Amino acid sequence: MKKRVLSLGLVLALLTAALAGCAGKQNASWKVTCPWAPSGVAAMVSQQAATKSTSYSDTITLVAEAIKGDAATVNTWVADTKANDTQLVFVGEGLLSITSILDPDKLQFGYEDFVFVENLYSSIFVLSADAKLNISSIADLEEYVKQGDEISVAVNGAVGSEAFLAASLFGAMGAGSQLKLTPYQSAAEAAQAVARGETQFAVSHQSQILETYQQGGVTVVCAFDEKAIENGPFAGVEGVGSKGYPYFRNRCFIMARAGTDEKKVAELKELYGKILADKEVADWLHDTMLLEVDTMSVADVEAHIDNVKSIVNQYKDIVAG
Amino acid sequence: MLQHIVPASGLLFTLENILWINIGVFIGSVFAAIPGLSVILCVILFLPVTYSMTAIPGMMFLLGIYCAGGYGGSVSAILINTPGTPHAAATMLDGHPLSEQGRTKAALKIALYASTFGGIFSALMLLFLGPQVAKVAAQLGTAEYFMVCVFGLTIIAGVSGKSMIKGLISACLGLLISCVGSDPMTSYDRFTFGIPRLYLGLDLAICLIGLFALVEILAKAEKKPGSLNLDARKIKDDGVITKDEYKRLVRPTIISSIIGVMVGIIPGTGASEASWFSYNTAKNMSKHREEFGHGSVEGIAAAESANNAVTGATLIPLLTLGIPGDGTVAIMLSALMINGLNPGLSLFTTQGDIMYAIMLGLILVNLFMLLQGKFLTSLFAKVVSIPQEILTPIIVIFCFAGAFSVNENYFDVGVALIFGILAWVLRKLELPPVPILLGLVLGSMTETNFRRALLISNGSPGIFFSSAYCIIFLILIIAAVGTIVRGKVLERRAAAKKED
């Protein structure tokens, strides 16, 4: 009797699996791999997009996954995928513009291994200062730099986007030799370091410095963008671009494997477009994450990569010695 | 605070929340009991489930996993001498020997009670002292972190076994292995040999599988099959904890809960550090030091109360300052942010009811963990009666599946195997494996904070004596080293007297 029940159970399980497999053909699941921390900005945005995907498409379901590992994760992704696989990956300026110049051996891929699908958001980094220094504008900063003292800046990671933004700003002010970059393990740690007085400045996403700013531990000096920040708690903070200093926004592109059917890529781009047009998503990105919805074309992406590359080439000696 | 408690209770005590707490607690207990399947991995896997929920049930579900994971790791540590999670490694030192004495149920019960006490203690700290404690923690800088790490390294003496020299050799090996990967201060690669998967260093969970689980399998392979199974006739496992034992548990449980909270509020540290600090403190303060490492009830209680006391404490900097206390809590941050809640003190004013509901919920989570744990203990305890020829292959499968699941690749399975062989060789050389684990846990943190502190001070060592907190830690380090030296001198005198 037991054996019969067991056999029946097995048959039912196989049948269910087969039916589930048939149903799956109608609706393709696209796994979106984020190669950074699951608690990071990109991973959260990707999860939010995945949650919304079923509301806007009957044929595509996005499944978000975060595997911390940066270059190692993308290397594995490239090695394990081929054209038309239902897999997507996030790649940012960190890999395409920074690592590709500073440590090209680390990358087993190039831009040509991907086809661009969409960019979901852009983040404007800000420079914060220890409140005791009383620096709250670019003019104040220029005055401070003129004194010729050492300038210590807390950044997330030794050679990340934040490090290059700090190097480009102080380098362009002619203070590259005064600059001391202090790397921390996370952006939150870097933000706390400046509030504690361990460093004089920190570069971070707006959302990561917000709480420290609200408690009065830091002042926000400038934004790494062309113009002043328009909305949110940091509205009115000057953009370094307005004074002629170099800058770039933080962007993370969603890529498919090179050679993937153009129609599929267009479908995915359309889906992402619909998700980003959702008011709930846009408000969440804007109000909670302090990010901007930022859809892009291939030309925009290439321009962004080239812009960051030129900054890295110009200031790599300050960052990497 | 009081004006928020009543509405917060109303938000918390719903059928939906209680259901999600229980689902989370069950998943966390089972997941953490399997070597390699860490709590952080479990939270990552189930995080998307919370995105369709509102903030309170979502957080209750994740907190259920988080807290029960703290306890669940001890189950495999006690049953099969393999910590389910890195922070249960200290529990293993006494939990498994007690189980081998035929007191598996008692060991599991002590771990459960101590975990519950530690969890509730830290939840109360979060509720009543959260913002004040967080402000103190925020003042601890790079130099203070380094002093904490050095204090942590003094534990090596306590877990070195018979030979301090061999313990130090093992610890140095652990510190060396922790250097594998990108240099945290310059991003240059170290000991990666051009292997891309090594850029990020070696994952602690994978090393643990090799060091403690696979080595046991290799050791068993050397023995005759008949000698491995416990003689069921000799074992009368009624799970009874005597009155005297309960009395002995009180002090280490309370002190370890305090240590757990203190460690937990310091961002970047975690349950592993807390359980080792507490285990060492309990050993130094115990009247039964000789029992440690051989099935001490105090050892189990100290390690378990500390690693669960961390759970509430890590939420203190998260909810009050927006700084996640450890990796798992960092992931929970996204469950809050996805619901439009940006943690920080201002949230206590704008969304006070929700914040207090989450804090009260942590107490509820621990109570349900106790209830479920009491039921599961009997089930778990039956594992030891499974014949080794059946249990061993199952453990091997779980070990390899666990190693694979961390990053979903076979490279990690190979790393686990290499660590298993390394641990087997070290066992032959009588080198203890626990100091290697301590080196792995503390290595990167010690190095990073040491180098960063010197960078901040432009190379001046004065930074390590520059604050009151540094001085306090320095005194603790000197006291710890003094205790070790005194202990060794007394041991030698005792040995000399015996010889006479």
Image: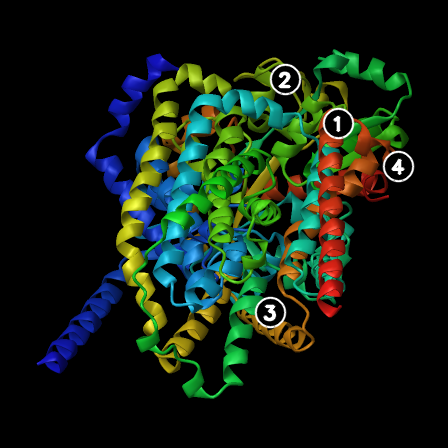
Residue A222 image position (x, y, % from top left): 69, 20
Disc 1 and disc 3 on one polypeptide chain = no
**Mark 1 surroundings: few (<14), some (14-19) or many (≥20) residues within 10 A:** many
Q: Tell me which label, 1 or 2, sits earlier in the chain.
A: 1
User: Disc 2 or disc 3, which is closer to the eye?
Assistant: 3
Q: Does residue A138 sit above or below A310 in this rendering?
A: above
Residue A111: which disc? none
Q: What residue type is labelled 4?
A: Gly
Q: What residue type is labelled 1?
A: Glu
Residue A16 image position (x, y, % from top left): 19, 67
Q: Tell me which label, 3 or 4, sits earlier in the chain.
A: 3
User: Disc 1 or disc 2, which is closer to the eye?
Assistant: 1
Residue A115 image position (x, y, % from top left): 54, 54
Q: Which amino acid does label 3 sit on?
A: Val
Q: Does residue B164 sit above or below B112 in this rendering?
A: below
Name the quadrant of the N terminus of chain B.
Answer: top left
Give the structural element (helix, strand or loop) at label 2.
loop
Give the letter of the chain under mark 3: B
C-beta proximity under 8 Å, tags 1 and 2: no
Disc 3 and disc 4 on one polypeptide chain = yes
**Mark 3 surroundings: few (<14), some (14-19) or many (≥20) residues within 10 A:** some
The alpha-carbon separation of the residues under discs 4 and 2 comes to 38 Å
Q: Mark 2 points at which residue?
A: A228
Question: Is residue A290 something that shows in the picture?
Answer: yes
Q: Name the residue under label 3.
A: B415
Disc 4 and disc 2 on one polypeptide chain = no
The alpha-carbon separation of the residues under discs 1 and 3 comes to 38 Å
Residue in front for this viewpoint, B399 or B76: B76
Residue in front for this viewpoint, B303 or A73: B303
Residue B459: which disc? 4
Q: Name the residue under label 1.
A: A198
The alpha-carbon separation of the residues under discs 1 and 4 comes to 14 Å
